[in-house]
Image: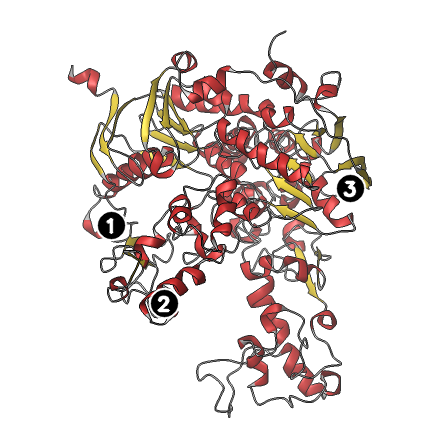
Amino acid sequence: MESIESEFINIVNANENNLKNVSVKIPKKKITVFTGVSGSGKSSLCLDTIAAESRRELNETFPSFVQQYLPKYGRPNVGKIENLPVTIVLDQKKPSTNSRSTVGTYTDIYSLLRLLFSRVGEPFIGYSDSFSFNHPSGKCDHCDGLGVVTDLDIHKLVDFDKCLNDEGVINFPAFTTGAWRWKRYAYSGLFDLDKKIKDYSKEELDLFLYSPQIKLKNPPPEWPKSAKYEGIYPRMYRSIINTKEGKRHQKILDKMVTTYECPKCGGSRVNEKVRSCKINGKNIADVVNMSIPDAIEFIKTIENPLAQDLKKELIKRLNALIEIGLGYLSLNRNVGTLSGGEAQRIKIAKYINSALTDMVYVFDEPSVGLHDHDIQLLKNSLNKLKNHGNTILIVEHHREIIKMADFVIDMGPKAGSHGGEIIFTGSYKELLNSNNLTGKLLKKKEPFKTNLRKPTNWFSIQNANLHNLKNVSVDLPLGVLTVIAGVAGSGKSSLMEFFQKVYPKDVIAIDQKDIGTNSRSTPATYLDVSDDIRKLFADTNKVSPSLFSFNSKGACPACGGKGVIVSDMYFMDSIETVCDLCYGSRFSKEVLKYTYNNKNIAEVMNFTIEEAIEFFKGKDFVEKLYSLEKVGLAYLRLNQSMTTLSGGELQRVKLASHLNMKGTVFIIDEPTDGLHLNDVKKLMELFNQMVDEGNSLFLIEHSIDVMKNADYIIELGPSGGMAGGNILFSGTPEEMLNSNTSITKPYLINSLPKK
């Protein structure tokens, strides 16, 4: 009996987040899929309970001296977990990236290539470090190892016909007259505020524009004591252009900043000396620019005995990328340009050939960003990990991934406080035969949409050559719902990027990238309802509204209104622990004495969107909350940190702020990522409503269910990377059935009900 029990991970009374006393036995060395509507508790059980407890217990096995350098994981709210192996989490969170992080450096393949060239490259130029574009001996000195050069047009940033006292003298939001960055020039005492910039002397102009950071000798009284003066040109590069702030103002920067390939190194990042060292006529820059299959073929041609061990390891790691469907990438691809799904699959590639066994691998939506054609590669990799004797836990909604599961756990019945229960456990076959919502939707095959809209107009794209696009010409329909389809890396996003550049009107692009989030950003602050709520509390209690802000007077003195204590671990990820004083509420004890309708500010801000709508019924700002409900995010809490939201949730938050627009062109990138089949249906209803109100929608999408409900489909391919970039099909979904070139066609046919 005991041996049988040890074949299961036994979870008893899990209550983390919205879980309601969940108990379940999960089979080991099998594939278990956790599914259910968005917000039902899948991640709470799989990631926040199982994975979190495994990490915590593993860290406690190390000596105290070592533990002080390791992240501190809190004990999840669970009665007990038995028979829990060591867990590795492979989520969609992108690795900490910067402009120097590439696919090659992240996978350590570039390190092996550096070693290879140092051993057998001719002429010998030095050891491994000499080939690094992050090392002084290897990097191009013109672009500092970045491969690109950024030029700021100072005349587009600064109006030379104005003086510092004039509005708009510096053409950037952060430098508006009166703002603190403007004060760094106006309050420096270095310039006549009424003197036009064009009348500055050469010395004054150099000081204003190009001065490095200097400490002022005799600054005016209003100048901050610790501040340093810096010219506007280096300040823009340091604090705007190369930061997240710059990304928030990308449209403005695009008008004044030009980025182009470094003319000295040709974008290779390395200097001439490094490029002179070759193996079989190729230098290291040539190799990292190859596609993965081409790189493998090149490595196979190396016959030097000193390279044999390195050859085996390089080929193994490169093949792992092909196995997981990333063969279209090149090793010099910047990691920051990868999607969440691609970043996750790179992590998977690290473990495919691992000798570790009896581990738990936790995957969060590994199908994200994958066409049905690519799903088989993912399934092969997951099965390979399982066959090594490991337990695979997957949070997933894709039909094919659920189908391959040995065991399915369906969470629900709804989202947020209405979820957190296990409503089904069993095999995929048992799920289909159950009366369960997920089972019904998986079993049912929907036909094509019958009433197709006719385009109100067309926009012609001619000879597009952006990224991997190959002289693409195609007509884009307006006034309808269009799906841009194709395998991963086929050129879908490139086509839409080109469209944005040439379309004469503003296009609203809603992707899954961060929206300038930080730990203090919440749905309430993003929707701009925080001020309204604070005013209600202030008017009721006859006190200042700032008292009810965790960014102002009302903040907990211990955590400063963050709700957590952040410990900087320097070379490791920072550690967050719940504040012992406010217990995560963010507010001071004094503030919590004040109430509105018998609720204090912390209780109110902890409401879900759904609860807040009911609580504040009749108030003007409730309309803003309805927008989140419409996009399926009613389960989010008002005070929930935006940093905890998935890419799909962030995307829908963005969408919520545009719902009332009409006559607009929208480009939405993978909107169904992370959505249950029932949530996809609801989202499509919203999209159809938006089109009926006069908008044009272009959905970059892989979901067959979405394609069947589209008015028009444009498919790119046939493969990813340089093997893609061609138009395979354009027309209605039904017309795709007659296409001889479509990659999507067989999957579309398979999804239709049999006649």
Residue flagged by tag 3: what amino acid is it? Asn
Residue 106 placed where, x, y %?
A: 50, 44
In the image, 75 versus 730, the foreground residue is: 730
Residue flagged by tag 1: what amino acid is it? Val
Do the residues under discs 1 and 3 have CB atoms within 8 angstroms?
no
Q: Which mark is residue 538?
A: 2
Callout 2: few (<14), some (14-19), or many (20+) C-alpha neighbours within 10 Å? some
Q: Is residue 311 visible?
A: no
In the image, 179 versus 231, the foreground residue is: 179
Disc 3 target residue:
465
Q: Is residue 634 left or right of residue 555?
A: right
Who comes first in sequence, dot 1 or dot 3?
1
Q: Is residue 198 left or right of residue 191?
A: right
Disc 1 target residue:
66
Q: Is residue 253 left or right of residue 552?
A: right
Who comes first in sequence, dot 2 or dot 1?
1
Q: Which residue appears farthest toward the left when viewing the image? A: 2
How many angstroms separate mark 1 from mark 3 (CA)? 53 Å
Residue 158 placed where, x, y %?
A: 70, 75
